[in-house]
Image: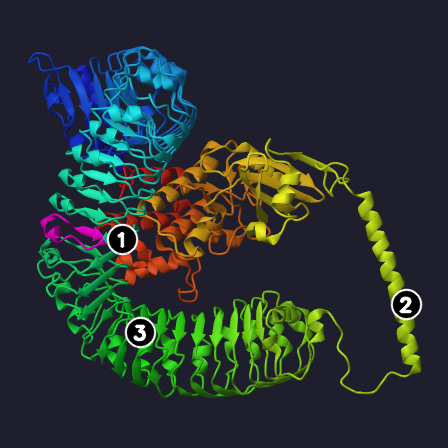
Amino acid sequence: MFLLFLGYVLLLVPIPSASQPQAALQLLRFRNSLAETSRSLLQWNHTTSPSAHCNWPGVTCYSNETDFRVKSLVVTKFGLSGVLVDSFPYLCQIPDLTTLDLSANNFSGSVPAVVGNCSKLIELFLYNNSLSGPLPPDIFTPGQLQRLDLGLNQLSGMIPPEVGQCKNLISLALDLNFLNGGVPSELLSIPSLSEVYLSGNNLNGSLPDFPSNCSLVKLQLPKNSFHGPLPPSIGNCRQLKFLDASENDLGGVIPQDFFKDLTQLEIVYLMRNNFEGQIPMSLWSLRNLTKLVLEGNKFNGSIPEDIKQCDKLTYLDLSLNALTGHLPTSVSYLRNLEKLYLHNNTLTAPLPSGIGNCTSLVHVAFRFNEISGILPPEICRLRRLEILMLNYNQIEGPIPHCIENLISLRVFSVYCNKMTGRIPAGITNLTNLTDLVLAQNNFTGEIPSDLGKNMVPGLDILDLTGNQFTGEIPSTVCSGNRLLRLTIGDNKFTGGFPTEIIKCKSLYRLFLYNNRLQGSIPNDMGISSSIAHFDVRGNLFEGTIPTVFSSWRNLSLIDLSENKFSGSIPQEFGELQNLVTMNISSNRLTGAIPPELSHSTNIDRLDLSKNELAGGVPPEILSSSTLTIIRLQENKLTGVIPDVFMSSRRLRELQLGNNLLGGHFPCSLSRIQTFQHLNLSTNRISGEIPSCIGDLIKLEILDISINNFSGAIPPATDNMRSLYFVNISYNQLSGQIPAVWAKALESNPRTTLGNPRLCLASMKGGNCRSHKKAHPGGPVLAGIIIGSFFLTVCLLAAIYALLTRFWHRTPTSPHQTLLYHQSSNEELPEDLNFMDILRGTEGWSDKHVIGRGKHGTVYRAESEKSKKQWAIKKVDLSESKFNSEMRILNLVRHRNILRMGGYSIRNGYGYIVTEYMPEGTLYHLLHKRLPCVALTWEQRCRIALGIAQGLSYLHHDCVPPIIHRDVKSDNILLDSEFEPKIGDFGAAKLDSEVDENETDSVIVGTLGYIAPENAYATRLTEKCDVYSYGIIVLELVCRKLPVDPSFDEGLDIVSWVRTTLKGCNHQYGLLDEEIKYWEREEQEEAMVMVDLALQCTEMAPDMRPSMRDVVASLLKFPSKFEGSV
């Protein structure tokens, strides 16, 4: 029966017939060879008609009515898949085929070498497939081929020099692959070549010379690793219109006359390189120039008046350089300019009034400069202007009253200037305005009463923080019902609580802190499903705390501190499962602390201090598994401290000072390994200090003053080596102070007062005397004298031995060191010797430490000769894999891998010299830098891409492949342009060093970044690096730690993101708070990157993409790489 059915099916499949035209036969064979086809190709049917195939989808025949030869086959986005080398030969046998386009399908395998046999093929497009492997030299055999597009595949290896045999080649596109090596000179020697697209590969080396007969029109080389200067011979390409060499490692000073012969240039992209010096004057003489992007270099000097010659410019981006001076008045000639980005320079002086003549302007960004003066009223002529960002300047004076003429304005941001005056009433007529950011200025007066009323889409962001605004908050700011953030803290607003605004369904953040608002907060505000951050601290609100807050299910932060609230704390707060921070300190609250507060499963910080709360400390609060900070000081709490800290695994700070608590020190507290700050001062706690306190090895601050502690301080406290502040004053302590506490107490003697039986001599290394007044007898005194004599003799002998040893080891040359007699092996940079290192680090002083890790300590040192700074990693050879790390660093060279400058081995230590990264680690930038560094979305994209390219290089371009095994943000270093470099290869392994059956006996990596399979001690693959990379991306986008204190117990950043995406009404809520300064398009892009990170952190390694796939995804990313506001 089965055989009959099979026969019936085979009868239905069209079989090529000899009666069909040759082209139709080959097309059918091509279709039948595919693994997956589309409905369109099902219309390719067997027929005896000589012309029927000319009507098949994708097929075009020659126009001659009697000629049914196939001219082109275009099946772009047909959903085809299969191994191309198996299917391509059929297409190559179509006799007169000149154009073949298989782009945007899913063909795999290598590029068919038989392409070279298609002698009549003129155009071949294989863009956006899954082709891999090297480029076969045979495809470049001499023929008619004029256009070849193999972009957006997974091709690797070098560009073969045989490409020069294609003498008719006009356009070559190899962009968005994984090609390495240099650009062969044979390619540029093709006389007909006019377009070259090589962006987004791993190409390196210097750029080749261009021939004298260069006919290039478009040259795209961005996102590679080219280094060195731009070759002067590029001037031979006199027809060049499009030059893109951005995002490489090109550098040096570009000669002033470099562009004098390139008069046809229309587009120049040189952003994110290392060019320095002044911008070449010849660039400003290019009258055809429409787009110029030099962002992210080191250009200095001023913008010349000659810029007026580029009057066709529509796009100018000179941001992130070191430009000085002022914006020239001749900018008024740029009537076609639409986007002007000059942010992150050092421009001074007022904006010229002539900018009002640039009536085509749509985007203007001058933020992070030193522009002074007033906003010229002429700016109001820019009726097409949509975005005006002047943040972080020195601009003074008022907002021009004519601002209402900017009818297209969407974003107006003057954050952090010196502007004064009132908000013009006419601003309410800007119907397209969505973001109004006037924070940190000196604006005064009242807000226009109808602000937001006439704005058609409605305000998204209103930020008036840090001014002198007065009056009441207009109820119209949410007229469009799309307001996301209302932040008006640090002003002088009066009146009552803005009830109408709180009913705005879109509102996500409401910050009213530090104003003069008064009255009560009504309990009938309604249920809000959107508000996540509610901060009204520092006002004059009174009455009881409304229970309606418990219905705000999305609430994660509530701050009611520094008001006059009274009554009890509503126990309903415990129903808020998304609540992370609760601060109701400095009020007049009474009653007991509700134990139900511990029911909030995400609660991280709880501050109820400085109230009049009574009763005991609820054990449920202290035993919370989520809280990291508990502040209950300055209340009237009584009873004993419950000894219930067994499950408080994350607690870092506990403040119980200034209460009426008694009992003894709770020993279960010592089980918390994360504990850092403990304040039990001004209570009635008694008994001895227990030895268990010594288990608090990470405790930094301890205050147990003004209590009734007695007895000796236990010796176990010497384990508390993180301690730097201790206050034990006014207790009944006695005996000697152990060394660690003594060191912490030395800085402030007042912290030991009120303990008359405490021996203070031990703080200075002395001995404590007995408190008995008996004098020593004769035998005792004789023993003391004899003992002192022998001690003196021993000390003198020891001093003599040390001096003798020193004299024998004194170096005879200033270039020798105290390690003179030790064996050494080193190869240091020419401008650095080991004496420089010792001097630069002051003998390895801690103050020169710039990083510590499990694989060593990193110091900063400077060459006395060149003044260049280096990073020196010092590792103990007995505890590290120094040789392995050295070998790997010698193997790799990539712009996103930390470059090794040299090494030294001395006296049991290894020293690795690497380039110094001035911006430090990504971890420090995201989580530790103060003040917090604002990162644009574009910078985050660049960091994510750079790390991915570095890892892709290690996994796919190194032979053998290299697995890093400890990828984390603390091992990602940033140069002055925020370009990431992967460092610390102490845990790395060559793939060839790992046997198939090998397992790691210990878990490799860092908590929070370790792939799940690592916990099972299986053989690690490169997919463990992919997982760690996904963690870094989430860290970068959300600015959260991999295991953040704000997460619920048991959650890491991956599970937190997945949980938040399922339950949060505002998906953007998981992103960094800086998102309010991003455009809506960038917010959406951020969520796309979150999705990519979640793919990288799939539980099963096989489900994760390769780093090549990640790079390919990022290169498809719709980021504003041309420049952004």
Amino acid type, callout 3: Gly
Q: Is residue 1016 left or right of residue 1086?
A: right
- The crowd level at tag 1 (other Cα within 10 Å; few <14, some 14-19, many 20+) is some
Q: Which residue is located at x 19 percent, y 29 percent?
A: 11
- The crowd level at tag 3 (other Cα within 10 Å; few <14, some 14-19, many 20+) is many
Question: Which residue is denoted by mark 3 in the rendering?
Answer: 538
Q: Position of residue 745 (x, y in %)?
A: 62, 72
Q: Secondary structure at mark 1?
A: helix
Q: Is residue 467 left or right of residue 853?
A: left
Question: Which residue is denoted by mark 1 in the rendering?
Answer: 1077
Q: CA distance from mark 3 to mark 1?
A: 25 Å
Residue 789: mark in rendering: 2
Which image quarter holds the C terminus? Answer: top left
For the residue pair 879 and 390, the one nearer the viewer reads as 390
Whether pointer 3 and pointer 2 mark residues with C-beta atoms closer than 8 Å, the reply is no
Q: Quadrant of residue 825?
A: top right
The answer to which of marks 3 and 2 sits earlier in the sequence is 3
Amino acid type, callout 2: Phe
